[in-house]
Amino acid sequence: MALRISFKIGGRVKINNSEVLPVTLAIYDQQGQIEELVSFLSPLPELLESKFKDWQYYIGLQGDRRRVAKNRDNRVSGVVNLTELANSLKAELNRWLGRDGWIDENGQPDPRVSLVLEKFRGKITEKDEVQIIVQTEDRKLRGLPWQEWDTLAGYTSRGVEVAISATNFKRLTQKQTPQLRATARILVVFGDEKLGFAQEEDFLKSLKRYGGEPHILRQPTRQELEKTLQDSQGWHIFFFAGHSESDPNGRIGRIQINPADGKQGIIEIAELRDLLEGVIQKKLQLAIFNSCDGLGLANQLTQLSLPYCIVMREMVESSVARELLRHFLEAFVKDRSLFASMNAARQQLHNKFEPGKSWLPVIVANPLAKELTWNSLFSERRLSWQWEMVLGVVALAMLICLPVGIFYEFQGWENLIFYAQLYPHITVYPSMFLWMPLFASYRAHCMIRVKTRPFIIFTFVTVLITTGALFFELNNNRMMLMEFKPDAVISIQAEKLDKLYSVWKTSQADITNVTQEMFNSQGAFDAVGNLTLKKSDLELGIKRIHTVNNIAGLQGLLRVATAYDVWRENTKAFSISRWFYAINFVAIVACGVQILALVSTILFVPDSIFNKNKYLTYLIMCELGVLLWLPFQGYSIEHTKSLLFSSEFRGTLAGINVITYAIISILFLTTITSIYKSATRKYQPILLSFLLGSLVLTLLSSVFGVSLIDVLFGMSSTDPLIPWFAIITFFAPVFFLLVRLIDLRVGDE
């Protein structure tokens, strides 16, 4: 949880003829402001000011990213111990900010500030993040290393991060618009190539793995920079490395974009005001200046309501600036907040360099800006609403094409009801439930900002499996009657029949024993034993199959009649509905197998997803939608196939169910692992409950689902159309209401 403390320091006022600085201390938690206190701080003591100036000067001697124009005089010569200087500056800072430095309105020592800050310490845990903002217009106060104030630094073992801010600011409203190619666009400007930016370039290009899109300008002209800033897609981050400087008051900043252009290569921020305002209004969230003395740059940018800047307080060595960038980016792409990422980078600088050098970088923040993380730079990878409408119409047409095709091709409701009762797993399920996993899968894909190697591999596997499954299904035996035209007829030669009898374990005697009410075998066989089959005769037999006890002969006949080898040479007998069936089959299989790609992405490369909580929610919805197919598939095996072909199909683990249940077990285990690994603690119990509910529903459907399908849609139902349309009418608005709730409530905090 992020906690925030704000110190608003005003200009000098007099109390009892002594000058003081008015300070408003405000403390915030996630619910808002919890306390405010007004006190006064004595001006900078002379000794602290002197130590600060010494540190400014000697830290500057270490820097090799020189100023655009020199503006400092030499102070003293000789060898200076930077460690002792930093320690003495820190000691004087803590002496000034101690109990004696605070004054009440009567000019007396004010212990309230220290008491409030010490009391606040008791509410902080090691897991909490503490963000401090010092609001002041004073250049000297902005330059102080506030994070070294012991009272604040002791809040956590990691220390705290202190940002500075102006006292006047306004809130900026930036609206993220979902787009198909949602990346974090980074404009990179390298000002002086002599400084060597190869490592910085590698750091920035490595962001591509996390959805970053760096565009690099090397020593650009003013016109090139202005043109690039106006890019219609906008920029999320602006990064500059090179030479820069600020005026003595820290109000105005300049950068050198091209040393070869002389004065034309030096740009003051104010000269780009109109362009920068447009860039900020679009999407710019952060500007990073890996260059010297950047407080003036940040001051002018925050006046334009830029949410955040990272600058160097003074002159800086290239090695320090480079290490800052490296460690900041490493932490930031892990979706830590800007403050936490800066704090992690500062700790690395503290460990690698002399004391005082880690004080150089500072965040300059707009106090009204939203908390910034890497993920917050991204929006969903969405199509435009127009294309989503087109996609929705195509998906709807795909889902209803089979029942509509049956209705028109086989002329009326009676045949639609007949085929729905025989094959609800392919006629009823798609229009009733398949839209749910299809939509959830699309929205989950919208959360993936980078198509990683596991995702690409499993997507390729999805294509292969779906293609193979479709080929096997269309060329497999036990074809469905709706795959044949209404007037389909096939003649089978006696020689071929002998082979078919052997394969399908039946005989001419078994077929001729079928009662005449179910199948006219005498009219089907000719004098030499050739068999002529009409689809209409087969349908009549199936409709009457419940009227007799001995159906073994009819089952043998149906095994022969629906064998693909029988119809292979007579493809003209295939119906249009066969191809609609193929479309629905592809959608079901592809949706089911694609879940593997979604699960592998969150499991192996979670950083490629920008809203993991929402992603996992849609993943579970996708899994649930596919699991609802199981009772329909179970009905196909337990009832349709066992009735039409053989009772050997009965059993919960018959046929494809063995593979199905194995895949389900793996998916549930990996999804649980992903929830514990990637979901935030707030959403973990919600997601686990959702997943557990899906598992319970799966178990219940395996026990009661087949019987329920039989009663509602199967051969035991009187009219499957009524529950079919009623369930769609009920579930569709409930589902999309849930989707709206997810979009509004499920965040990535």
Image: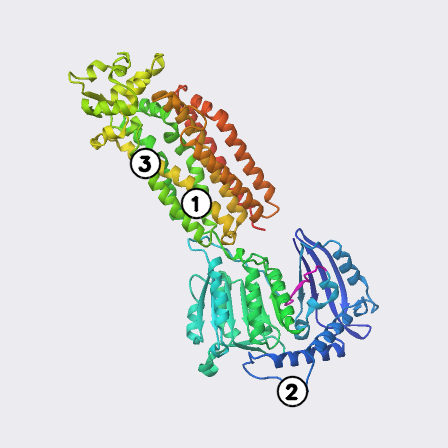
What amino acid is labelled 1 in the image? Tyr
Percent position (x, y) of residue 44?
Answer: 74, 75
**Residue lying at 64% horizontally and 68% vertically, measured from the top left:** 351
Q: Are marks 1 and 3 in contact (CB under 8 Å)?
A: no
Q: CA distance from mark 1 to mark 2?
A: 64 Å
For marks 2 and 3, the one nearer the N-term is 2
Question: Which residue is denoted by mark 2 in the rendering?
Answer: 74
Magenta part, dominant SS: loop
Q: Is residue 481 magenta?
A: no
| First-in-chain label (1 vs 2) | 2
Q: Circle 3 is placed at which residue position? A: 472
Q: Position of residue 103 (x, y in %)?
A: 80, 68
Q: Which residues are drawn in magenta?
A: 155-167
For residue 442, the mark is 1
Residue 654, image x, y percentages = 42, 28
Looking at the image, residue 268 sits to the left or right of residue 591; the answer is right
